[in-house]
Image (spheres, helix red, strand yellow):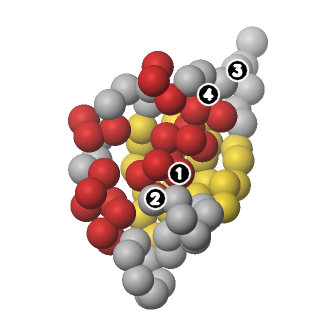
Amino acid sequence: MASLTWVMEYEIDSGESVSQAVLTSVGIVEDTAITNLPVLYETVDPDALDAIFAGDGNRRMSFAFSNSCIEVYNGEYLIVESA
């Protein structure tokens, strides 16, 4: 039997960093507490991730984290798909 895939679009609040949005949204999709997720730094540098999306501009980045695939768009929203 095939497992279900869950896709969620998450809007990043103006006061929320991209790295925090990744943790929050993956926690929701994987139905687990943020503290139970792998360390984000082992996948991507959170400071660098936040810096990439600081300011205006048309940027997109995708990467795998925990059991999910993440696509970040312009630092405004991201899409999380469970693997």
Q: How far is the residue under mark 4 from the one under mark 1?
A: 14 Å
Camera sees residue 75: yes
Up the image or down, 1 lies above or below 59; here it is above
Q: Where is residue 7 in the image (x, y as percent from the top left)?
A: 70, 44
Residue holding disc 3: 3
Residue holding disc 4: 30
Q: Where is residue 38 in the image (x, y as percent from the top left)?
A: 37, 26
Q: Position of residue 50 (x, y in %)?
A: 35, 63
Q: Residues within 10 Å of mark 3 (few under 14, many from 20)?
A: few
Residue holding disc 1: 21
- Of labels 4 and 3, the one closer to you: 4
Q: How far is the residue under mark 4 from the one under mark 2?
A: 18 Å
Residue shown at 30%/69% (left/top)? Answer: 51
- Of labels 4 and 2, the one closer to you: 2
Q: How crowded is mark 2: few (under 14 residues within 10 Å), some or many (20 or more)?
A: many
Give the structural element (helix, strand or loop) at label 1: helix
Q: Which of marks 4 and 1 is nearer the N terminus?
A: 1
Q: How crowded is mark 1: few (under 14 residues within 10 Å), some or many (20 or more)?
A: many
Residue shown at 45%/87% (left/top)? Answer: 56
Relative to residue 64, is residue 76 drawn left or right? right
Q: How far is the residue under mark 3 from the one under mark 2?
A: 28 Å
